[in-house]
Amino acid sequence: MGRLVVLFCVAVTLAALAWLYPPAFREANRQARANARLDIIDRELGGGNSVLPAQAIAIEARGRIPENGTFAVAVGPPQPGWSSLTIPPTVENYMRYFLLPRKLYPDAPWILCFACDRGAYPGAQTVWEDSPHQLAILRRPP
Amino acid sequence: MTLRALSGLAALNLAYAFVGLALLWGFGALRTWNAVARLVGLAYLVGLAAFGVLWTTLLVAGVPFDGIAIVVSLVALAVVGAAVARFRGMTIRRGPRHGPATWTVLVAAAGIALAGLFLESLFRSARIQSLQAYDAWAFWVPKGKAIYFFHGLDEHVFTTTPNSMYPPLQPIVDATAFHAMGGPDAATLHVQFWFLIVGAVGAVVGLLHRHVPAWLLWPPVLLVLVVPRFSVLMLAPLADVLVDLLVVVAALLVALWLRDAAGWRLAAAAVLLAGAVNTKREGIVFAACVLAAAFVASRLRSWRPLALTSLAVALAVVPWRIWTARHEISSGAPTSFGTDRLGGALRLSFDVLYSNARWSVLPVVATIALGAAAVWGDRRLASYVGVLGLLLFAGGVWSTVGFPELTISADESGNPIVRYTGSLIFLAAVVTPLLLASVWRGGEEP
């Protein structure tokens, strides 16, 4: 009887394997092809594509803020075209990841502005702007 | 992704395997060259876990983390293992040269071919995969980047990222991979997780090879790779897969130790569990479950080595606890023990565990195998696996009950119960062959 149970278990497992292996193999290959199709910016940003209204703010911030610099993130009210993930904690977490070794500090000289209230940063200069998406990089005077 | 990055990663992971082989030699596991070949997958996990535990301690002590320090620590671990082996007079002999039956070779070859084909497709996906998983970019990879850029546990990053109480073994592995790749390349980092999966498959197959016939071994091992909830999702740079693999391979070592009382198995399990407790908070729960189940299933005279193993694992928790206490970071332990959520949490854990859509038939087959082993097979093994399974299940229920902020839902954004249950599924896949083999042999040990 015990051996019959063993044979039953092996048969069920093999049937499940025969059912699942081909689609899993196809999915892994489909995923590999999809990954290969990504351009370098899409691949570099990864999850940021779902968080940021536009890729440019991440790339511009990385180019403009020195590696030993610090930055803050200011997110205003949601704008048309923004995803549900464009909210303060998610944007902060993502920019912290993407911009390291630059560090995230609330009083940093560089401000990544997502439709933010620019009046809250008197004297800050706009060093880059994407008006359609309400994005900007501000620089507070030293 | 460049050839240089991939070559660096390959060299690093080979180094983990060499370190692990030296440690296993020191533990007395490698008596023959056959054993060396058979246990190289286990050695890889042991080497990686030992390296991670060592660097958790060194980082807490303030030792700078850079390329030279990585190489020195790997060499030091290997030298310690080899020195212990020489001191104990361990030699590696040529093993007996009797081959298995032809049909066993054919089944094993089919298993290796199917696993190899699938792993190859995962590799092609991993080498150019963008970093998508929320937890990966929200805190796991930033912590790894911080160790890479700032050569240690940067206070600002480690205290301000979400889940700051999580221990640093996974970020250490990530930072080491960045050094090996020549830069913090988050896309190629997925290949490090591919190596983990390959190493774990090798470890399980190598450990079970002499205890289980190939036709019982390969079906569950292949199935767990392709069930919908794992498959390509295993490549995400999260600590969940690492902690599961370390705990489950340790649990398998303990299961085999219950049979043959070989001390090296407990030593290797201690290293893996020490790695697990430094990988994720639930690693502590998992390790406690494995050791508690081992106490229940073992004879009283075996309790001393188990107690020493438990002590070693408990000591491994201390450095990170010192760091979190020094920085006033809460342990993140459950805050509520009310019974009002117990019914819902039980139902949720049960539904997730027996979810055919996520894990296919693995939990059902493992449950049948467990029952059959209790009746017709190795009852001690069945009691160990049964107690371990129940404790792990109870741990999942406890986490949903103990954190009132978690929703009673399988939605992964509100409750990590699906990820938690992954450990039970990996366990099901590796113990099912052992349970079924014991039933097939009528309870007699091989």
Image: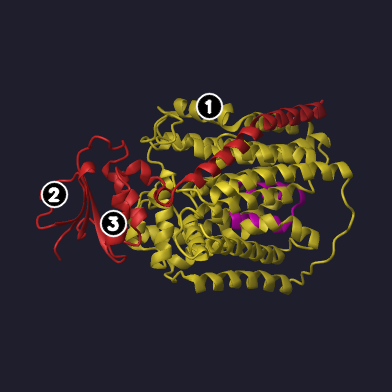
Chain colours: A red, B yellow
Q: Nearer the viewer, residue A120 or B221?
A: A120
User: Mark 2 Cα within 10 Å, few/some/many (few <14, many 20+)?
Assistant: some
Residue under the point 64% across and 51% down: B198
Residue beneath the point at 33% across and 49% down: A93
Q: Which mark is residue B399?
A: none
Which chain is indicated by disc 3?
Answer: A
Q: Main secondary structure of the magenta part?
A: helix
Residue occupying the point 75% across, 55% down: B38
Q: Nearer the viewer, mark 3 or mark 2?
A: 3
The quadrant of the image that shows the C terminus of chain A is bottom left
Mark 2 secondary-structure assignment? helix
Residue B97 is covered by the magenta coloring: no
Calculate the distance from the C-alpha at mark 3 to the C-alpha at mark 1: 46 Å
Asked whether, in this view, residue B381 is left or right of residue B73, the answer is: right
- Can you identify the residue that label 3 sits on? A61
Residue placed most toward the observer, B19 or A140: A140
> In terms of secondary structure, where does tag 3 sit?
helix
User: Residue A72: image x %, image y %?
Assistant: 23, 54
Q: Nearer the viewer, residue B61 or A9?
A: A9
Q: Amino acid at mark 1?
A: Asp
**Height in image: B26 above or below B209?**
below
What is the span of residues highlighted in magenta in the rendered image? B246-272
Q: Which residue is mark 2?
A: A118
Do the residues marked 3 and 2 share a common chain? Answer: yes
